[in-house]
Amino acid sequence: MERIEEQAGVVRTALGQRSIVLVGMMGAGKSAIGRLLAKALNLPFIDADTEIERAAGMTIPDMFEAHGEAYFRDGEVRVISRILDGAPCVLATGGGAWMDADTRAHASRVGISVWLKAEPEVLLKRVKRRSNRPMLKTKDPEATLRHLLALRDPVYAQADVTVGSRDVPHETMVLETLTAIAAHVTPVEQTAE
Ligand SMILES: Nc1ncnc2c1ncn2[C@@H]1O[C@H](COP(=O)(O)OP(=O)(O)OP(=O)(O)O)[C@@H](O)[C@H]1O
Ligand SMILES: O=C(O)C1=C[C@@H](O)[C@@H](O)[C@H](O)C1
Ligand SMILES: [Mg+2]
């Protein structure tokens, strides 16, 4: 806990007016870890999926059902852009949001992006618990998830910082995330020869 506070202090100062943008696959822990990270940093936590649902006045599964994925993605880009233009926060993006080039460019101007990277087996185990993910409503959700990972991992890898997400206490994930961000935002002293 003390170490979380210590690293949070370093990160909070170095961040200035920038946000933290969490990216990664469904089940990576963006919402769960993001909430705790925001608390440690004393920043607002915003979950893009929740904001999209609020803006549309319907759930994401209903949006996919009624209007299709393209409609959802369109709203997602606009909602995330609005959040990125707002006050500094910890933003949990939706699993597919980072695939949009404008969103990546916007995030890199105003924030530090963090990829929560998890093994497919970990993700599968976690997403099986809930059935609210329209992207996985296919005949073979495991194959779909592996296919999406193959497409998305090289793009998630463009985030500023990568943190390994696995089944460890949430506090461990928060500390590792803060430590990785601190290493990214704190310039290493150059020693003159
Ligand atoms: N380090 C962890 N150890 C164990 N379980 C975890 C860990 N991180 C997250 N989880 C659990 O995994 C599930 C998925 O996490 P979460 O909802 O935060 O993922 P997400 O990245 O926000 O996914 P989505 O893109 O679908 O919103 C939740 O039940 C959460 O409690
Ligand atoms: O990975 C995805 O494409 C998605 C992930 C969720 O967070 C939601 O944004 C939605 O279900 C789509
Ligand atoms: Mg989430």
Image (spheres, rainbow, N blue to C red):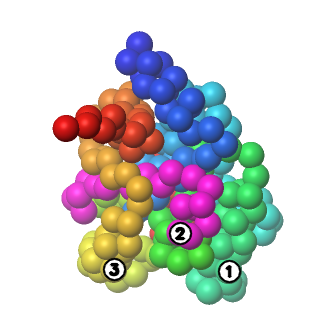
Q: Nearer the viewer, mark 1 or mark 2?
A: 2
x 65%, y 34%: residue: 43
What is the distance, in whole Å, between disc 1 and disc 2 at their CAs? 15 Å
The local secondary structure at tag 2 comes to helix
Tell me which amino acid carries mark 3: Leu
x 62%, y 86%: residue: 70
The local secondary structure at tag 1 comes to helix
- Asked if the beta carbon under badge 1 is closer than 8 A to the nearest atom of ligand 2, the reply is no
x 66%, y 42%: residue: 17
Tell me which amino acid carries mark 1: Asp
* 154 to 66, vertically: above or below: above
Q: Are marks 1 and 2 in contact (CB under 8 Å)?
A: no
Q: Does the magenta segment cover residue 25? A: no
Coordinates of residue 111 in the picture (x, y in percent) = 57, 52
Question: Which residue in the protein does label 2 denote?
Answer: 104
Q: Is residue 132 visible?
A: no
Residue nearer the viewer, 11 or 1: 11
Question: Which residue in the protein does label 3 denote?
Answer: 151
Quadrant in which the C terminus appears: top left
Q: Does the magenta segment cover residue 120? A: yes
Marking on residue 177:
none
Question: Which residue in the protein does label 1 denote?
Answer: 74
Lower sequence index among marks 2 and 3: 2
* 35 to 146, vertically: above or below: above
Residue nearer the viewer, 53 or 84: 84
Magenta stretch in the rendered image: 104-122
Q: Residue furthest top?
A: 2
Residue nearer the viewer, 71 or 155: 155
Q: Residues within 10 Å of mark 1 (few under 14, many from 20)?
A: few
The local secondary structure at tag 3 comes to helix
* 62 to 187, vertically: above or below: below
Residue nearer the viewer, 49 or 105: 105
